[in-house]
Structures are given as structure tokens and as C-alpha cells.
Image (tube, rainbow, N blue to C red):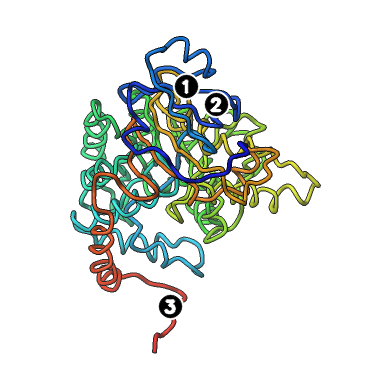
Amino acid sequence: MNSKISSLSPYSPEQLVAADQLLAPDWLLLPEGPRRGQAVLVVDGVFADVGPLAMLKSRYPAHQIQRLENMLLMPGFIDTHHHLSQSFGKGLVFGEPSEIFRRIWIPLEGSLDAELLYLTSKLAAFESLRGGFTTVCDAGTRSQEGVEAIAKAVHEVGMRCVLAKTCNDLQGEQVLDASRILMVADKHLSDWDNDPLITPSLAIPIPEIATDSTLRAVYQLCHEAGRVFQSHVNEHLVAVERSLERYGVRPLEHLHRAGALGPHALLAHATLLTPEELCLLRDSGASVSYNPVASAWKGNAVAQAHLMHCLGVPLGLGTDGTRGDAFRLLDAAESAQRFAHGLPVGDSVCGSGELWLNMGTQTAADVLGLGKVTGRIAKGLAADFLLVDLAVPELLPSWNLTWDLVRLANRDQIQAVVVQGKVRLWHGWPTDWDARELMRQVDALARDVVNQAPVHKVHPFPTVA
């Protein structure tokens, strides 16, 4: 890194995205890895040009050069599995056994009116943006208020979102009107055609809450629209055993049998896969969201993410709404893989830092169908990027920046978060809306919401004297 060590920012948010200048950071994270001596030109929210600084200087002689000393300009992170409507209760899961969705999320989300759904989603989106995520994939809410409140929150925060509509037609023993569900699903896929931040998606949270015909039909809608079909599979042992008891197959096999396992499927967790299921997954073309923090907090196993990658299964990293911190997610992804699968066989590399960094950026964009929109610093793609301060003691001396980002980088190094060429956060705080007022609103309302919802915790909170 530059020998002149200074973390002070000699520029303003407006200067960072001015159209008449070249941004010249000390390091630029390109698809092939971190590189020095590079520059980018941002025009109308996209990377208009990317390349060696000398080359861009000759192409644009009238442009000023904004040198970003000791800074890394990198793609924004992408969270391939989130639940934006759960931020009021994320701390409720600590110490709880698996399948918390039955005891906590269904009761809590079902208690949210439109305003509360908007507030909880905006809080979650803000937290994600502070953690370096410029895109999140929301897996669908159980609130009856629909997705409009979530979309409003995402727009105000200014981040990109793959937004799912839930489409299950089984509710306990009751079979719902599938034709109406499919009509609403089809409308959802077309409602956001011209939205710059929202990409629609459909979800059936777990295979067992839909008939096979609806699983197949919802997947087919996504296939025809070129969108992502989301489902949670093989996350908990009890769910796998319940599926075997009820249907004679495991959840991933259930999707396959119903005709809902294919290239447009994005499967969250997939932690408990047999060798046969791994082969089925590989052959289907489906993608997986690897959620290592969720495994640590409430899971039964760690997904075989490195093996899946070697088999050619597309993977992205997901938080599952646990914490919106991208650098800690990278660390958890590599660490969990090493503890669960690397150490027993003496694998000291576990895919290398590059695998996990890519899984949080460019390959994450691919699994969401956004590879031609975001996830890379490349000409023609959206200017969704982070400016990361490298002048910190944790990164000195730096021998391999890729590994450093996975194991040593911190959220507090993020100086700016930019989405579509607009600075959304500057030193962790919004540039165009009052985040502290949002926090005051949440603090005043969230506790009452949780107390009034029919939530059941196996391990109750300690009594406060």
C-alpha cells in the first residue's frame, strides 16, 4: 500500500460521483482480482469506462483525476438470502433450537401492519447497507400486508433488492385457491418491469407448504419470466425427517419430483444433502445460497459449499437476516467451511480467499440473475460500489489483499456506499434521509410489537431486576 498513511477523506460525497472526473483508487477490485494503477469513470449511474489510469487519462483529457489514496474501490456485496421483515426480532433467536420460523417468525411477521412492515424492512435495509451490501435478496414475508411496504423501504434506503412474493397454497390442512395465488404471482413478476432497484421473484418458503402442482406452476412462472424461484431446503434435521414421513422424499427431492428444481431455483441453506442429492443438485442447474452465520446460530449443519462449487453448483453468500455485515459474513463463510469440512481432511486452503470474496460479489450477482447488472467493476454495469479505507493497522503489512478482505477487513473501514452512481451512505450514515429518526421510531415501537405477538421462545429472556 501507499507509504503515506492517512485515513482522512479529502473529498466530498458529491466529488466522489461527479461525472467529469476519473476515480483513481490505490486498489481496484476487478473480476480477476485486486489491481493497482486502475481508474473508473462513472456516468449516469453506470461504469462508463474501466481500465488502466494512463489509458483513461488519454481517452478523457478534459476530466479531472480524483485520487483516492489508501482506498480500495470494490463491488458492493450481495446478500443472496435475507428476511427484511424480521429485523425487530433477530435477537430473539439466540439460544433457540431449530425451526424458529414456527415459534418466532410466523407469529411476529403475522403481527405486522403496513407501517410496521415498512419500518422493520427499512431498518434491515439500512443495516445491510451499513455492512456493505448494495443488493439484498428478500425471501418473502409472511405478513398479510404484501410487498409494497418492503419496496417503499428499499427505495428510500436506496439499495437494490430481489423481492419475492410468497406463493404457497397449503396452510395447515387448508388448501387455498391456487388459481388466485398464481394470478397474483404473475402480476408481481410484471409489476416491477421499469423499477431501477426492484427485481421481482417468487418464493415457496419450504416445499411442504405447497401442492406439487403449485410448486411446478410457480417455478414455471419464474422460468418463463427469467426470474428466481426461492425455497428453503434441507436446513434442519426435523424438516428432512418430516418430509420423509409425509412425502417419502427429502425436501430437495420433493422439489425435483414436483418439477420445481431447475436453473431458476435458488435454494437457501441446503445444509443436509446426501451424495445423491448433491448429484441431483449439480445436474439440475439450481443455485444455492450458503448461509454460514445461520448455521452457527440456529442450524444443524454447515453446507458443503466448497464441494458444491467444485461440482459446478452456482453459489452466493446469504445472511438469512442474522446480521448485515458483509466482511464478517466472508469470515464466517471461510471459517465454517474450514471447521466443518477442511480440517477433517487436512485442507489448509478451503477454496482460498478468492472463492469467498467472489461468492459475496460477482457469483452472488449471477445466482440472482443480476450478473449483467451488478456485482462487478466492469464497463456498462451499474456503479454499485464501496470505498474501503485500507490505511488501518489490521491490514498492515498487507501481503495478499484478497485474503485480507476475507479475514481481516471490518465494516468500519467502509467510507462510502454507492448504488447506481449515487452515494447512499457516507461514513456509515445516509446522505439524504434521517436514519436516527428511523431508529427512534423503531425503538419506540418494536418492543411492544414483539411483546404482543404470540411468539414462543424455548429459552425466555432473563428476568431484569
Residue shown at 22% from the left, 37% from the top: 184
- Mark 1 highlights which residue? 378
Residue shown at 39% from the left, 21% from the top: 64
Residue 19 x/y as whole percent: 33, 23
Q: Badge 2 local density, few (<14 within 10 Å), some, or many (20+)?
A: some
Q: Earlier in the sequence, mark 2 or mark 3?
A: 2
Q: Are marks 3 and 1 in contact (CB under 8 Å)?
A: no
Which residue ends up furthest to the right in the rendered image? 346
Which residue ends up furthest to the top in the rendered image? 59
Q: Earlier in the sequence, mark 1 or mark 2?
A: 2
Using the image as rendered, state which of residue 331 and residue 15 is in the foreground: 15
Q: Are marks 2 and 3 in contact (CB under 8 Å)?
A: no
SS at mark 2 in the image: strand
Amino acid type, residue under disc 1 in the picture: Ala
Residue 235, compared with residue 374, is above or below; it is: below
Amino acid type, residue under disc 3 in the picture: Pro
- Mark 2 highlights which residue? 30
Q: Are marks 1 and 2 in contact (CB under 8 Å)?
A: yes
Residue 285 x/y as whole percent: 53, 28
Residue 199 x/y as whole percent: 32, 32
Residue 388, compared with residue 343, is above or below; it is: above
Instruction: Left or right? Give the position of 168 relative to 347.
Output: left
Please tell me the numbered disc located at residue 460.
Answer: 3
